[in-house]
Amino acid sequence: MDTRGDTLMSTHKHPVLSPELIDVIVDFAHDDRSFLLNCSLVSSAFLPSSRFHLFEQLHLRHSQLAEFFDLLESPLSTITHIQYMILDFEYKHADLPSTLIRLQNLGLRSMLLARIQVDNYINLEWDFTGFASLKKLTITRGWFPSPSHMFDIVLKFKSVEHLHIIQPRFNRTVSTISMSDRKLPVSRNSTVPLWRILELHFWAPAYETFAWLTMQPDLPVLQNIAITGLYAEDFASAGKFLQSLGPRLNYLELQLPTTPLSKSICISCIA
């Protein structure tokens, strides 16, 4: 009885390499996209490991959202390994709650929201339950009615430990109002932020942002702060916020304003 055919079939039915060894090979070339693409075509055994790195980072623009959601909702979709996503709204009037709700089950660990434009208050009576793995959130070059509205959006992501705000712009800033009109409409959010790291990088006066932060008495785990791009008129409000944190602050990186600080401002910051 000739068993050579059976031997060949059994050889082809089972991978020559163990899954653990395939993972080691593919992981070694995690940053070589062309290699990963070739691996994914060589054998179906290489596909899961290659896909993990190929789809680890994803950059989506507003103009691509419809096509991406069609792909994501397809029964043939295999995009399950995205760890870091850049979502660029391109200053378009996007349905932010609907967009994020459709992304919340991807298991993201880090997300960057770029160029969000919100002209009016929107209904924020929605919540996310599928972003439990999201530990870092970055918002860059966004336009909001006020810091309260921006932070209302931020606090929908309840697992975030590292918050990074880059060059926010608001409809109403210190530069457009008189110095006597300093009581700005800032509301406190009832959600307790659990940020351990807070990075704030400004390109406009930041009084309103620090006013909102100072009104949050429950920042129990915030220990590391970096603040850059301050204006001279913001230094007092920044100092007041830092004072509210007390001795639990472990690390502070503070870029001083380029213009000289007045004596009264310095005293109010260190008192």
Image (cartoon, rainbow, N blue to C red):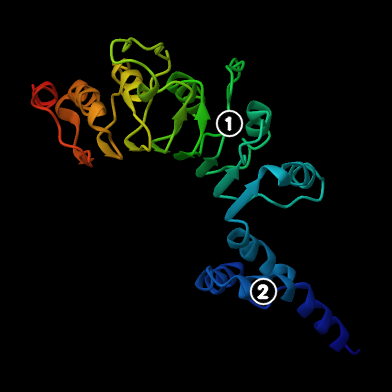
Res 100 label: none
Q: Nearer the viewer, residue 205 or 150?
A: 205
What residue do we see at 20% from left, 38% from top? 259
Vertical relation: 156 (above or below) 113: above
Vertical relation: 263 (above or below) 62: above
Of circles 1 and 2, the one toward us is 1
Q: Quadrant of residue 253?
A: top left
What residue do we see at 55% from left, 74% from top? 25
Tag 1 secondary structure: loop
Query: Which image quarter is the N terminus in?
Result: bottom right
Q: Nearer the viewer, residue 16 or 135?
A: 135
Measured from the top left, where is residue 160 in percent x and y? 44, 34
Left or right: where does residue 191 sit relative to residue 107?
left
Left or right: where does residue 16 sit relative to residue 32?
right
Left or right: where does residue 35 sit relative to residue 230?
right
Label 1 sits on residue: 117
Label 2 sits on residue: 39
Measured from the top left, where is residue 152 in percent x and y? 48, 21
